[in-house]
Amino acid sequence: MKIKDIRASVHHYSVRLPMIDKPLEERHFVFCEVETDEGIKGCGITGAFLPFSAVTALENDLLNVVKDMDPRDTEAIHHKVWWSLNPRAYTGVISNALSALDLALWDIHGKKTDRTVAQLLGGFRDWAPCYITFGFPFFDYDQLVEYAKKFVDDGNTRLKMVVAVDPGGWQEDARRIRVVRDAIGDDIQLMIDANYRFNPVDARLLCRAVEDCNLMWFEEPLHQNDARALADLRKHTNIPLAAGQMEGHRWRMRELVDHQAVDILQPNCVYNGGYTETRKIAHLAQTYNMPIANGGGWPIFNMHSMAGLMNGWCVEFHWGMHQVGQHFFENVPGPENDMVKIPDAPGLGFLPKYDVLEESRVKTPEDLGQGGVQTRGFEKGVTKL
């Protein structure tokens, strides 16, 4: 079996949330499809950062490097890509493009062998714990409480909210956290995520203000995931720290481990080089008795890592990104009673909705956010799911 073609494109989706009429988020992502000489197709995705550059990298640079290689030989493929295109271990576009390619390769491998990606990764279990990201920065106090109670009533006992909300600084974040904690009670596990936005002083002040709120973790509190500063913050708070969702390869994760900067590593297969790299990061974490958890969304891809690997923990169901997954793919599982079940179908376990992808395709960088539609289409072909 050999790789014969790679196709990639940029897509747009307006996210709507329950109980709110108008779209509140505009999401963009890169869809990638790899086809073999046997007609088996696999798909992968990566996020919205420099998406057209990722498409160019996939359809030109990466295809030229990996064409005619066996898609199951992911170690050989990664070795060749690194030394041909990225010998100095850059991140960004190359990590994103390699992620999308790698996910598609594991999808093909699963379809060829009639096994799920979670089984190929190690088959630790066919399910994973999950949590709901619900507390968006544009919510007021009433909306925070309304959504928190809604998801608790639906059977979810792990919730995450965004902090570093301006204006108001860390003091406003502290008030928002307390509003939610008071509304959901002490038995619901609550996480917070700053998306890199705090400096070390403000992060430490927020930690001190909410340490009695029994937080499950504080995700990516500091600018640039500064490992030295994260290690210092960790020494001064009893709130577990988590980071790593946007790191492009295992060496950045190793820096977090070496500095004892975090309690939980968060490899995201959509950004860090795919399942091949995520497995290496998981094994690194395992040697230090550290769990890995999913941050950065895209649960239907990351659920395989969290289920298949021994130290895999929680899958993030970011409500906006979960909608994107449901919209563009068939047979997509969702959270149910604090867990997500891996589909029985081989590979990723779900298929692209080609008509929806076609309708959502973006023509040019200028059309991002406007839902521009491109003319070139995908062929449905043989999927062997």
Image: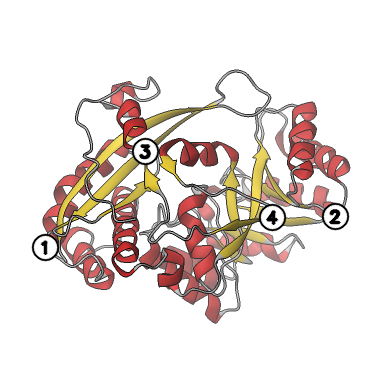
The answer to whether mark 3 and mark 2 are in CB contact below 8 A is: no
Is 131 positioned to the left or the right of 366 in the image? right
Front-most of residues 42 and 226: 42
Residue under the point 47% across and 41% down: 325
Tell us which disc is closer to us: 1 or 2: 1
Q: CA distance from mark 4 to mark 1?
A: 42 Å
Is 38 positioned to the left or the right of 351 in the image? left
Look at mark 3 in the image and give the residue it sits on. 353
Give SS at disc 2.
Answer: loop
Callout 3: 10 Å neighbours few (<14), some, many (20+)? Answer: some
Look at mark 1 in the image and give the residue it sits on. 68
Residue under the point 32% across and 38% down: 51
Query: Is 367 placed above or below 303 here?
Result: above
Tell us which disc is closer to us: 3 or 2: 3
The answer to whether mark 4 and mark 1 are in CB contact below 8 A is: no
Residue 338's label in the rendered image is: 4
Marked residue nearer the N-terminal end (4 or 2): 2
Is 355 positioned to the left or the right of 151 in the image? left
Q: CA distance from mark 3 to mark 1?
A: 27 Å
Quarter of the figure that contains the C terminus:
bottom left
Marked residue nearer the N-terminal end (3 or 1): 1
Marked residue nearer the N-terminal end (3 or 2): 2
Front-most of residues 383 and 57: 383
